Amino acid sequence: MTGKHTIILTTVLAILSMLGLIGMLVVEGGWDLFFFLLTILPLLVGVIALWRRRGVR
Amino acid sequence: MSPTYVTGTSRTYRLNLWLHRWCSLLATLPFLVLCLTGTVLIFHEEIDAAMGVMPAAPGLSASQRPLAESVDAVLAASPDEKVIYLGLDAEHHPGLLLLNTVPHGDSGFERAKLQFTDLATAGRIDASAGDGTTLTGFLLELHAQWFLGPFGELLGAFFALLVLVSLLSGLVVYWPHAKKVAFGLLRRGKGPRLRQLDLHNTIGAIVLGWAFAVSLTGFLLGFGTLATGLWSQQQLARVQSMHTGAPVDPRRPPIDADHALASALTAAPTGWQVSSILWPGTDFSTPRHYTVLIGGSGLDERLVRVVLVDAANGEVAGTAELPWYLKAITLSEPLHFGDYGGMPLKLLWTACTWLTLFITINGAWLWWDRRRKRKVKVRDDIKEVAP
């Protein structure tokens, strides 16, 4: 994945991460885990991307 | 997006590259300090507890002594001082009453001493936080004010603005790179520069959302003192003009804290609690009124409302919501320090802080390395041309 898709992915992940941060603060109760997962989504996607391309030169 | 934009040579690209480079370089050293102090401050509750700064919370008890007895106990122990603030925090300090005392003539919090009492017994509890010199307090002053007071806060806002510009311009600068290199690819065998560049871009993309949220909230927090001062001046001036009357003795107001608390609750929505009481004669009250802060649960716990209680007769003189700018600043605090989601969020905050610090430093290295190579090239060119 290169170009426009990467920029869109980066921007969408950043927005989702911020929504997760705000969601954890604003919403009470059982939604905490969902919003926490949203928050760490960019980290998870980044780690997966690094792992999948670890051998590529 | 125009085709010329993505070639990496357009004016927009060059402007963003310039902004990204210089905003980042200017912010590198302050950002290093902010990240190091910020990492410690994320765990301020655990550190304070381990160092005995805050007394162990006795826990909520079925029976509770009147607040006035706690106030009396503190005043008896500090005869040259007066109480100006009382705080209740059942979530973080159950069973504990937090009181600020200052010398008689003071109306601000600059020389405030923090004291504690047990709500169940109204007895004083000793803790090292009282003298105001704690490790986390010291680091917070450095992190938030650079030891420069309100001016330092504005300086912090400026640094946060630099980081914000750097993040946004970084996204634009990332575009040509993203066209050539797949997301998450670290090119190997092509030299340390390309490897560091790939790391810079990949980690930057990963922490973009977090870094943007923390920088934006840091920027807003930089205006905290200014905004609070503005609000207290505007709001209090209005209240003072509406409610005239003789000032009360700020050390011993006719109406005690329990009466003020009960009066404030009559003006509060059902289920709301009092979180703080400010005594008459402070910078945030009038010479005649208690300023009582009330909050609900969830978001309402942070977006407190203000109730003014007449300290002469216990009547509610008025209630007010925080203005929008103070609401924004109030909500910025947890979003900046990440202390509202337990240990998992604190660990995430730490990881993102260090990743952001890494790309700041490796970005500075990329700039220095490019500069160094250019200088070497120029020197070689001169040698070739020279007879």
Image (cartoon, rainbow, N blue to C red):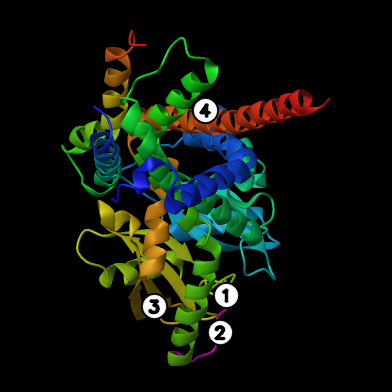
Quarter occupied by the C terminus of chain B: top right
- The disc labelled 4 sits on which kind of residue? Phe
Q: Is disc 3 in contact with disc 4, using a CB cutoff of under 8 Å?
A: no
- The disc labelled 3 sits on which kind of residue? Gly
**Secondary structure of residue under mark 1:** loop
**Residue at the spot of label 1:** B281
- The answer to whether B31 appears left or right of B259 in the picture is right
The verdict on residue B42 being magenta is: no
Residue B125 at x, y = what percent?
55, 41
Q: Mark 3 belongs to which subunit? A: B
**Residue at the spot of label 4:** B358
Query: Local crowd at mark 2 within 10 Å, few (<14), some, or many (≥20)?
Result: some
What's the CA distance linking mark 1 and mark 2?
Answer: 8 Å
What's the CA distance linking mark 2 and mark 4?
Answer: 56 Å
Task: State the residue lying farthest toward the right.
Answer: B387
- The disc labelled 1 sits on which kind of residue? Gly
- The answer to whether B227 appears left or right of B321 in the picture is right
